[in-house]
Amino acid sequence: MKIWSDKEKMSRDELRKLQFKRLKKTLNHVYENVPYYHEKFKAAGVKPVDIRTLEDMRLLPLTTKEDLRKNYPFGLFAMPKNKIVRYHASSGTTGKPTVVGYTKHDMKVWREVIARIATMGGVTADDTAQITFGFGLFTGAFGLQQGLEKIGAGVIPMSAGNTQKQIMIMQDFQSTVLIGTPSYALHLAEAAQEMGIDPKEELFLKYGLFGGEGSTEEMRAKLNEAWGITATENYGMSELIGPGVSGECLAFKGMHINEDHFIAEIIDPETLEVLPEGAVGELVITPITKEGLPLIRYRTKDITRLDTTPCDCGRTSARMAKITGRTDDMLIIGGVNVFPSQIEGVLLGIKGIGSNYQIRVLKKGYLDRIEIDVEVVNQDLLVSVTLLDQLYKEIQTKLHTILGIHAGIHLVEPKSLVRSEGKAKRVIDLRSEDL
C-alpha cells in the first residue's frame, strides 16, 4: 500500500517526541497571542511551562464550540488579519457561524494532510476526482481539492447539486474517484439508474472518499454495491482544519490520525477525565502545527475510540474507529440510549427497504420517542398487505432485538423522501412542539 509521507511511518517514540515539541510551541503561541486563552489558562491555574509531558495535557482547559461563538469572529485567532489568507466558517444552522482562518503555513499543512488521506484511500496521480461537496464557506470541497492537486490527480470541482449533469460529467470525463457525502453518493447512484446508466458497468469509478457526515458499515456496503467502488471514510471539522484530521487506509482498520499534526485524546463526556486507549468516549483534538487558529483540547462531541496497534498498511499512527454518534445527538428511547447511526445500521441491513430514511423525534412524558419513515424498494410491496406486514414486523423486531427500542414505522413509496445534495438531515426534532 502506497504511503505518502515518511512521517506516517515514524516509531511511536519518535512521534511522541515530535508531538511534545510541537505542542509546547503551540501552547506558547496561544498563551502569548490569544488573550482569551491567556485568561483561560490562568483560571485553570496552568501555564505552558507546567506542561512537561504529553500526559500533562489533561491539566489544560478544554475548548468548545461555545468558546468560538463567544469570540466571534476573530477573538481566538493567534495571528493578525494581514497573515490570514483564507477564511471558512461552519455550516451551523443556529446563531453565529464558527469562523476559522488559515495562514500560508496552515494552507501548506492542509494540502499535506489531505494528500495523505487521499493516498490512504487509493488515489494516485493517474486518477480523476469529482468533488460533489459544495464550494463555499464549508471547508470540505476546497480542502479536498488542494490535497488532490498536490498528489497530481485531476480534479473536477463540480460542487453540489445538478445531479443529472453530475452523472453526465462523470461519464464523459471518466471520473475514477467520487468525493462527497455518502448520502449524496447513494442519491447519485439512484439518479444514474433512472437515466438508464449502470454505474458499475458504464461508469469508471474505482474509489470513493466520503466524509462530512457519519456513516455505518452497512452504508459502505450499499455504496460499494451501487457503484462497484472501494469506499473509504475520512474525518475532520472546520474548527480543527477541515477534512484531513484522519482517513481510512485500504486495510480498513480505522481512520489513521495525522498525529504529527494533531494530538487525539478520548475523554469521559460527563467527568471530562481522560480515558485509556481502547475505551469509548468523546474525541478531543489539539492541532499542533496550526498558526491562525490553534485550538487547545477541542471537544468534538464525536464518540469513538483509539487504537495504536500495528496496521497492515505500515503506518504507525493511531487510528480512530468509526464515529458511533455525538454526545449531543443521543436519543433516550424508552429509557435506552440510542444514536441515529445505530438505527441506520439496523435499517440498511434489512432487504426490501431503501437507503433513505427519516427519523422524527417526539416527546412522550419525560422520554423521547421516535417514528421512522422508511422507503420500500419495490412499489409492488405497497399493494400487498401480507408482504408489507412481514416487512413492518421485521423492522420492528430487529430494532427491538438489536437496539432494545420500540419505534413507530411508516413504510413509504420508493424515492418519496427528500434527497440531500449535501449532508443528509436524517433526524427531525419535534420535541419542542410537544411541550
Image (tube, rainbow, N blue to C red):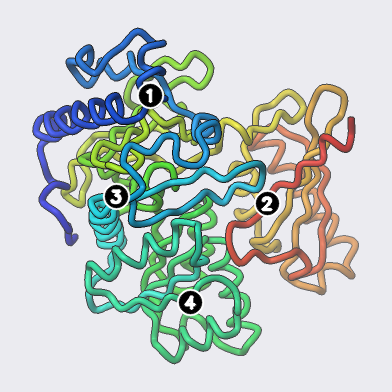
Q: Which residue is drawn at the image coordinates 50% and 81% (left, top)?
A: 199
Question: Rounded to the nearest whole Å, what is the CA distance between mark 2 and mark 1?
Answer: 36 Å
Q: Which residue is drawn at the image coordinates 46% and 66% (left, top)?
A: 224
Question: Rounded to the nearest whole Å, what is the CA distance between mark 1 and mark 3?
Answer: 20 Å
Tell which circle, 4 or 1, labels the residue nearer the N-terminal end: 1
Q: What residue would you read off at disc 4?
A: 158
Q: Which residue is drawn at the image coordinates 40% and 63% (left, top)?
A: 142
The amino acid sitting under disc 1 is Tyr
Task: Report the disc number at residue 426.
Answer: 2
**Residue 163 visible in the current orientation:** yes
Tell which circle, 3 or 2, labels the residue nearer the N-terminal end: 3
Using residue 240 as the reference point, say whether residue 416 is left or right of it.
Answer: right
The amino acid sitting under disc 3 is Lys
The amino acid sitting under disc 2 is Arg
Using residue 145 as the reference point, say whether residue 356 is left or right of it.
Answer: right
Disc number lying in front (1 or 3): 3
Circle 3 crowding by C-alpha within 10 Å: few under 14, some 14–19, many from 20: some
Disc number lying in front (2 or 4): 4
Disc number lying in front (4 or 1): 1
Q: Secondary structure at mark 4?
A: loop
Question: Rounded to the nearest whole Å, what is the CA distance between mark 3 and mark 2?
Answer: 39 Å
Q: Position of residue 71 (x, y in %)?
A: 50, 33
The amino acid sitting under disc 4 is Met
Using residue 403 as the reference point, say whether residue 266 is left or right of it.
Answer: left
Q: What residue would you read off at disc 1?
A: 37
Q: What residue would you read off at disc 3?
A: 83
Q: Are marks 3 and 4 in contact (CB under 8 Å)?
A: no
Of the 4 image quadrants, the one containing the C terminus is: top right
Q: Secondary structure at mark 3?
A: helix
Tell which circle, 2 or 1, labels the residue nearer the N-terminal end: 1
Q: Position of residue 81 (x, y in %)?
A: 36, 47
